[in-house]
Image (cartoon, grey):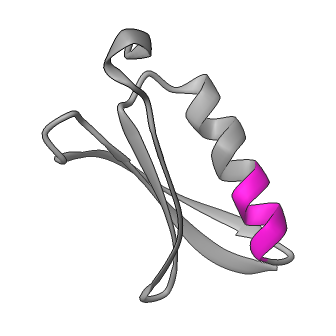
């Protein structure tokens, strides 16, 4: 299991939470980050593996909560 970091950001880009997840690989990490994003009310989530960004999901203004 490898550590990945999920950064939860506001609409202005400020980090409001950081969560480290442990997954077997990039695909599992992307699935886990997408699930976390659905469960959170943050505007954006970024998934990082060390210095490499693997994924970024952002809510559009109509669905921001």
Q: Residue at x 39, y 41 (%)?
A: 44
The quarter in which the N terminus is drawn is bottom right
Tell me residue 45's x, y (percent).
Answer: 45, 47
Nearest the camera: 1 or 63? 63
Looking at the image, residue 43 sits to the left or right of residue 50; the answer is: left
Most common secondary structure along the magenta stretch = helix
Looking at the image, residue 30 sits to the left or right of residue 40; the answer is: right
In the rendered view, tell whether residue 1 sits above or below residue 21.
below
Tell me residue 15's x, y (percent).
Answer: 24, 49
In the rendered view, tell whether residue 46 sits above or below residue 1.
above
The stretch in magenta equals 26-31
Q: Is residue 65 magenta?
A: no
Would you identify the image quadrant in which residue 39 lies?
top right
Number of numbered callouts drawn: 0
Q: Residue at x 64, y 76 (%)?
A: 3
Q: Is residue 28 magenta?
A: yes
Q: Residue at x 43, y 21 (%)?
A: 41
In the rendered view, tell whether residue 34 sits above or below residue 42.
below
Nearest the camera: 16 or 53? 53
Looking at the image, residue 43 sits to the left or right of residue 48; the answer is: left
Tell me residue 5's x, y (percent).
Answer: 51, 67
């Amino acid at each position: 299991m490898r550590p990945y970091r999920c950064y939860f950001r506001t609409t202005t880009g400020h980090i409001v939470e950081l969560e480290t997840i442990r997954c077997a690989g990039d695909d599992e990490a992307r699935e886990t980050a997408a699930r976390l994003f659905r469960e959170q009310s943050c505007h954006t989530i970024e998934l990082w593996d060390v210095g490499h960004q693997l994924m970024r999901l952002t809510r559009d203004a109509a669905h921001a909560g």
